[in-house]
Amino acid sequence: MKAKHFRTGLNSRLLGRWAQKTFMDNYPMRIAQVIGKLSAGGVESVVYNYYRHMDHSRFQFDFFIDADSVCLPRQELIDMGARYFVVPPYQKLPQHITALIRLFRENRYQIVHSHMNTLAVFSLFAAWAAGVPVRICHNHSTAGRGEIAKNVMKYLLRPFAKVFATDYCSCSRYAGKWLFGRRAMERGAVTVFHNAVDLDRFRFRPEARSVARKELNLEDQFVVGHVGRFCFQKNHEFLIDIFAEVYKCRKDAVLLLVGDGPLMESAREKVRRMGLDGVVRFLSVRDDVDRLYQAMDVFVLPSRYEGLPVVGVEAQAAGLPCVVSDCVTGEARVTENVQFLSLDAGAKRWAEEIEKSLVPARESAVSIVEKHGFNITLAASELQRFYCSKLGGGRCVE
């Protein structure tokens, strides 16, 4: 069941609850994290991962989310000390900016960290107007073919995204170069924070695989998996075409689709139309994705564009062979079990590559992924040091 859209009452109710808490000398430091719309997507997942592994006695996050979000705030994070502020969506731009300026001023933030990609211009303008000294623009995405209106907006806003920022960050060098430019990357003006994960959670365990496959009734199946929001970017319609080709050759094949989104119903309709009911399973948003990776045999990601997909890192840590689109940055290739393919290669070619990608003996790749900087414990420490370097105060002494 989908969560209802936020109402204004949620904002006042939450703020009333939070107002009961006091923090001596603004300690721990509260940092505004501008997320936008909560939609069980990759960006919020990344930011949440970092928050879970921060030192909460020194740093706390305040999440700023749009009122038309379709997911609810995470109670587990609120219990850790996080706060959520609900503001008008950016489509109502004057109200959106006015609300941000007011809240930034009231809370006297020293750091505003915006994860809105090119849309960060609006929240960072609000931070500038509110007198916030450290204003971080963090890019998690790029542009892809097909989304004409969205791409027009991205390219129009791209020159302005940096105007009110004091610092630039990105999830990959590719994403950094796309928004901030090659010269900014070359001179070290962009700090890359990997979409790091809790590696131990995704470590491959044969016994966990057996249990998961038994519980999901997949013991004798060839399991193709995908985790991603049902939206244009993730390209589910092509993924279903790919699986149809796989199923022609392997009647033991099953496709697991994990996620939710606006295009889910059209994907369901395509599955029915192609006679794949029963072998394509829609699992919606799950909190046990790590367990589902254990059950999979291969992970497929035919995205039209990406920054650096966190699900690709998770799948590789779980020892899965991955077949991904060449629209995904090469930085996503952490292990040897990743094959890039063009979206123009066709569904049959993708199906052949999926069959070829299978590994004879699956092993955990956690140590390899860790060497590439995707350990969330270490990455969270790096983020803390980054914040400290910007504040330069005594409270940040390690």
Image: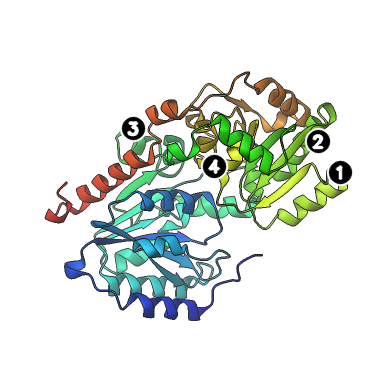
> Disc 1 and disc 2: Cα gap in Å?
8 Å
Q: Which residue is mark 3?
A: 186
Q: Horizontally, is 273 left or right of 346 in the view?
A: right
Which label belongs to residue 290?
A: 4
Q: Earlier in the sequence, mark 4 or mark 3?
A: 3
Q: Is residue 345 visible?
A: yes
Mark sitting on residue 78: none
Image location of residue 49, percent across then percent down: 42, 49
The reply to whether the C-beta atoms of the residues labelled 1 and 2 are less than 8 Å apart is yes
Residue of label 1 = 274
Q: Are marks 1 and 3 in contact (CB under 8 Å)?
A: no
Which amino acid type corresponds to the residue marked 1 in the rendered image? Met
Q: CA distance from mark 2 to mark 4?
A: 25 Å
Task: Rate crowding at label 3 as few (under 14), some (14 to 19) or many (20 or more) other CA atoms within 10 Å.
Answer: few
- Which residue has dot 2 on it? 244
Q: Position of residue 166 (x, y in %)?
A: 28, 52
Determine whether, in the image, residue 387 is placed left or right of residue 95: left
**Badge 1 density bin: few <14, some 14–19, many ≥20, Cα 10 Å:** few
The answer to which of 309 and 356 lies nearer the viewer is: 356
Ranked by sequence position, the earlier of labels 1 and 3 is: 3
- N-terminal of the pair, mark 2 or mark 4, is 2
Q: Residue furthest left?
A: 394
Q: Earlier in the sequence, mark 4 or mark 1?
A: 1
- Looking at the image, which is closer to me, 396 or 125? 396
Name the amino acid, label 3: Glu
